[in-house]
Amino acid sequence: MDLEQFNQLDTAHAEAVLSPCVHIHSWIEHLVQHRPYSTRDALYQTAKIQAQTWQWSEIANALAQHPRIGEKKAASALSEKEQRFSAKEQGQLGADEDLQQALYQGNLDYESKFGHIFLIRAAGRTGAEMLAELQRRLNNSVVQEQQEVQQQLAEIALIRLEQEIQ
């Protein structure tokens, strides 16, 4: 969809376009309410700034919409578009069984420590890079990790927004 089409959508349809990007209603609502955007860059800058305002409770709820790295399904059902986003983003993992097992064990360790799934922007990263990040982030404090999760979720949302509105 191009920017002009997005600017002209009614509120419900505009929200539906943005919801596969990230399940944070305040972000979606803010972007929809501030239309029309004069340029794509204006939309992306608004989205980036708004992502910095996310509260941990919103982020925690959004995490349920993401599959674990190395898994195909999230804890809750994904829309067809979200499934395509996730499959494309995790396409670098490949079929290496040792890597899959290490990611699986790392996910379990991470969830045990932090109480939520490990989230990382998978786009542009290899499976080995994601595993290395997972292992590094296991050394974070809860506060440090919440900041990293927010940054990663924002990166994912912005990449998806760029793919949605061209």
Image (cartoon, grey):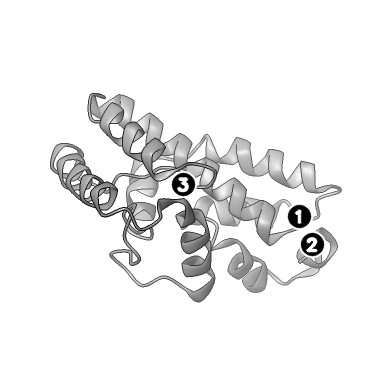
Q: Image height check: is 103 above or below 145?
A: below
Q: How far apart are marks 3 and 1 (CA)?
A: 30 Å
Q: Position of residue 68 (x, y in %)?
A: 31, 54
Q: Nearer the viewer, residue 64 or 25?
A: 64
Count of numbered labels shown in the rendering = 3
Helix, strand or loop under label 2: helix
Q: Image height check: is 29 above or below 40?
A: below
- Label 3 or label 1, whichever lies nearer to me, is 3
- Label 3 or label 2, whichever lies nearer to me, is 3
From the image, which quarter does the N terminus lie in? bottom right
Q: Position of residue 96 (x, y in %)?
A: 32, 53
**Residues at badges 1 and 2 in contact (C-beta under 8 Å)?**
yes
Residue at image point 50% right, 54% down: 89
Report whether 135 appears left or right of 51: left
Report whether 56 appears left or right of 103: right
Q: Where is residue 147 in the image (x, y as percent from the top left)?
A: 39, 30
Label number found at residue 35: 1
Q: Which of marks 3 and 1 is nearer the N terminus?
A: 1
User: Label 3 belongs to which residue?
Assistant: 122
Residue at image point 21% right, 42% down: 106
Q: Which amino acid does label 2 sit on?
A: Asn
Q: How far apart are marks 1 and 2 (CA)?
A: 6 Å
**Residues at badges 3 and 2 in contact (C-beta under 8 Å)?**
no
Q: What residue type is labelled 1?
A: Arg
User: Label 2 belongs to which residue?
Assistant: 7
